[in-house]
Amino acid sequence: MIELITKYFPNLSDRQQEQFAALYDLYAEWNSKINVVSRKDFDQLYLRHILHSLAIAKVCQFADGARVLDVGCGGGFPSVPLAIMFPNVRFVAADSIGKKITVVRGVCEGAGITNIDARNTRVEQIAEKFDYVVSRAVTEMSPFVGWIWNKIERGKQGTLPNGILYLKGGDLDAELAATKLEWQQIPISDFFEEEFFETKKVVYTAR
């Protein structure tokens, strides 16, 4: 399982490898109580959820101390894998469904992930500012931008200027054009060779 991660991220510390390896059993345990990863999908956890989340790390390396908001985090994707990858970055993982946040907190506790603040809240109710906002196919882009645009501070707390990094698939041209912002669509197949990623992208816009 973990080999899929180390294949693309060969420089992980022993601690990071331990944390990534721990995720399978932790999610299996929590998923049996609260279903956050579909049963048929679960054997593909490292491919479809963990590695998919880490595509963001191939597009942007967050600087130490950066503040990242994961909107509609569900069971903790992409924030849980990213928090392991960037242990000195501060993540807020927000979801309006309380039982999903229970899973995120349980997984973080079990894996010793201390840089995620998991919150059962709607994103509109979050007052503070962030350097980056990440998410995975939560909703159409126009309403999403409306929720979070004023929560992003201008600047550059990583290898890209502060902004939105969003995991999405398919033909996005019309949806992105509707936001009136300039987007980059980065194919995940540029980084990962598995067939699952063929139509998947990281879309990015700077604040």
Image (cartoon, rainbow, N blue to C red):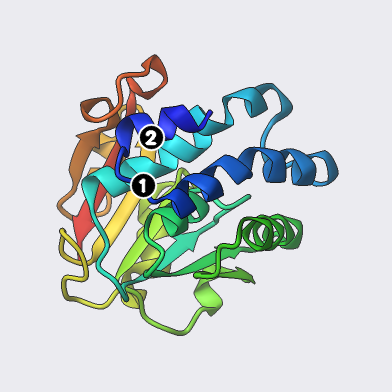
Coordinates of residue 166 in the picture (x, y in percent): 35, 48
* Amino acid, disc 1: Leu
**Depth check: 117 or 18 in front?**
18
Which residue is pictured at 32% across the width and 69% down the height?
A: 149
**Quarter of the figure with the C terminus:** bottom left
| CA distance separating discs 1 and 2 | 7 Å
Coordinates of residue 138 in the picture (x, y in percent): 50, 48
> Residue furthest toward the top?
195
**Residue 120 horizontal side relative to residue 117, left or right:** right
Check disc 1 and report the residue beneath it: 12
> Based on the displayed image, in which of its 4 quarters is residue 195 positioned?
top left
Say which label, 1 or 2, has the lower sequence index.
Answer: 2
Element type at marker 2?
helix
**Residue 73 horizontal side relative to residue 62, left or right:** right
Q: Residues within 10 Å of mark 1 (few under 14, many from 20)?
A: some
Which residue is pictured at 78% across the width and 43% down the height?
A: 29
Coordinates of residue 66 in the picture (x, y in percent): 31, 72
**Depth check: 119 or 2 in front?**
2
> Based on the displayed image, in which of its 4 quarters is residue 7 positioned?
top left
Marks 1 & 2, CB-CB < 8 Å contact: yes
* Amino acid, disc 2: Thr
Which numbered circle lies on residue 6? 2
